[in-house]
Amino acid sequence: MSTYSSTDTYTVADVEKVMRSVKADLIMIAKSTKAMTENDAVNYAHDIEVLAKKNHLRYADVTLMCGSSEVRAVKYEFQTEDATGTERPGGVLWPLTPEDKGGWIRIFLQYTASSSAEERAKLPMKISWSPSSTDTSHKDLTVSTGRGYSSNGFGTNRKDFS
C-alpha cells in the first residue's frame, strides 16, 4: 500500500477566485484602451485560467503597445504556495490607445519548467498561442509593485509598468 501527500493547500475554486480578479483586470484594460475587445479579454483570461489550474504558468505578461512601443504593462507572477494579497482588481485604467490608432495588446505566457507542449495541447484553449522569444523586461518603463491576488496559498503577484 502506498500513500501520497501534498503540500498544496489550494483547490480549483481558489484558482478560480484569483482568476476572477485577473479577468476583471483584463476587461478593464480592454475597456480603457480599446486596443482589444472585451471578448478577446475574456478569451485570454479563460486560457490563463486553464493553464493556471494545471500549474503550467510561471507568469503572464500583458503589454499595451502603440506600434512597436510599449505604453503600459502588467506581469502576473503565479505562486502555488504561500501567496499573499487580497486586493481587489483595478489600477489598470490605461490610456485610450485604440487599434485604429496603432494600439494593440501583446500577451506573453512563460510556462513552468514542468509544463510540456504535449500536455498543453490537450487543454481546451480559446486562443491559438504560438512560441515567442518576446522580451518582457519592459526596460523603457518604470516598474512598481502592483496588487496581489490570492486564495489559500495560490495566487499571483502583479507588477505594474508605466
Image: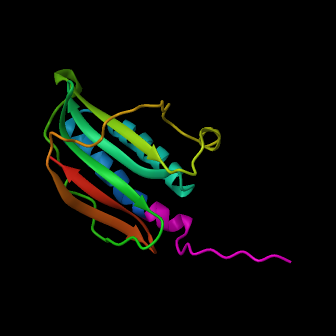
Tell me residue 79's x, y (percent): 43, 63
In the picture provided, is 86 more to the left or to the right than 128? left
* Figure quadrant of residue 102: top left
Tell me residue 60's x, y (percent): 38, 47
In the picture provided, is 72 more to the left or to the right than 39? left
The residue stretch that appears in magenta: 1-17
Q: Main secondary structure of the magenta part?
A: loop
Residue at 64% x, 44% y is 119
Tell me residue 145's x, y (percent): 20, 61
Q: Quadrant of the N terminus?
A: bottom right
- Disc tally is 0
In the picture provided, is 161 more to the left or to the right than 36? left
Magenta segment: does it hold 12?
yes
Residue at 54% x, 39% y is 125
Residue at 57% x, 75% y is 7
Answer above or below: position of 98 versus 59.
above
In the picture provided, is 101 more to the left or to the right than 121? left
Magenta segment: does it hold 3?
yes
Instruction: Using the image as rendered, state which of residue 2 and residue 72 is in the foreground.
Output: 2
Q: Is residue 135 visible?
A: yes
Q: Is residue 36 visible?
A: no
Colouring mode (rainbow / by chain / secondary structure / one colour): rainbow
Instruction: Using the image as rendered, state which of residue 39 and residue 69 is in the foreground.
Output: 69
Instruction: Using the image as rendered, state which of residue 76 and residue 30 is in the foreground.
Output: 76
